[in-house]
Image (tube, grey):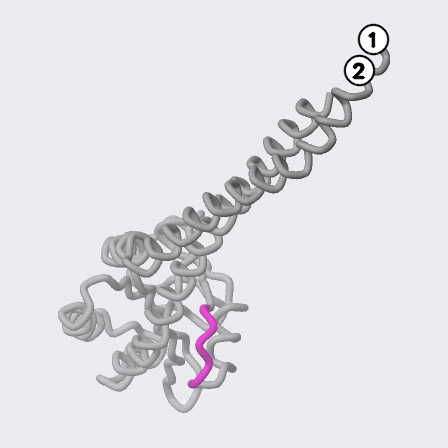
Amino acid sequence: TVNTLARRLLVSTSVLLTLLLVASWIAGTLSARRFADEMNQALNRSIAMYIVDKGPLITDGEVMEGRLRDVAAQAMVLNPAISIYLLDPVGRVIWPRAETVIRRVDLEPIREFLAADAGQHVAIYGEDPAQPSTRRVFSVAPVRSSDREAGYVYVLLGGAERGALVRNIADSHILRACFGGLVVMLTFTLYAAWVLTTRLTQPLTHLHGLIVDTDRE
């Protein structure tokens, strides 16, 4: 009947708008996380260079572990949510070995980072030697020894503080305001759909009643 079709139309509209609302919320949350990563990487872009500039980290092929520990401790005072690694030219982790699950890091993101313009604010993600399934934003700088490239200082950004930052942004007033606006929009649209459906079906319902009465006569 006409009323059945109207109800189906209203239900279909409700389902589609609800899916739109959920998709918009997910997209907003993911965008917020991406923005947090971009800001984190942009603000900490030079931290690896800061570590390299503190003195020779590799001399005649030997890793200066004492200096690395001291410099790493200083850097982590400034930013406790970082993890510092020293890689050789092909991406193998040569310090600290005890904290790694994978021994070799993919160099493609590192090359992309070094080739990127300093003003670029697109997040670049690299492998985490301690958590192979996780990719994190990072800072990296080449290490030279005897005028040759001897490896890279590879600094992963984030950790526990990054998770808190993402949660804070996901729960921020901006996203909540957007979600509230979407709810209002959904409610208004459903009401408008109900009004329009009612007005459109009333004449059809009346006509259907007249046809039924005529058939009975």
Q: Which residues are magenta?
A: 119-123
Q: Between residues 154 and 139, which one lies in front from this camera angle?
A: 139
- Quadrant including the C terminus: top right
Identify which residue, 206 or 175, lies in the foreground. 206
For this orientation, the residue located farthest to the front is 217
CB under 8 Å between callouts 1 and 2? Answer: yes
Please rate how many residues cluster around mark 2, counting C-alpha atoms within 10 Å: few if below 14, some from 14 to 19, many from 20.
Answer: few
Label 2 SS: helix
Identified at 29% across, 52% down, the residue is 171
Residue 145 image offset from top left, x and y in percent: 37, 85
| 146 left or right of 205 in image | left
For mark 1, what is the residue?
Answer: 216
Kindly identify the amino acid type of the residue bearing the numbered disc 1: Arg
- The quarter of the displayed image where residue 53 is located: bottom left
Count of picture labels: 2
Q: Is residue 132 above or below residue 96?
A: above
Location of residue 64 in the rendering, given as x and y in whole percent from the top left corner: 24, 74
Predominant SS of the magenta segment: loop
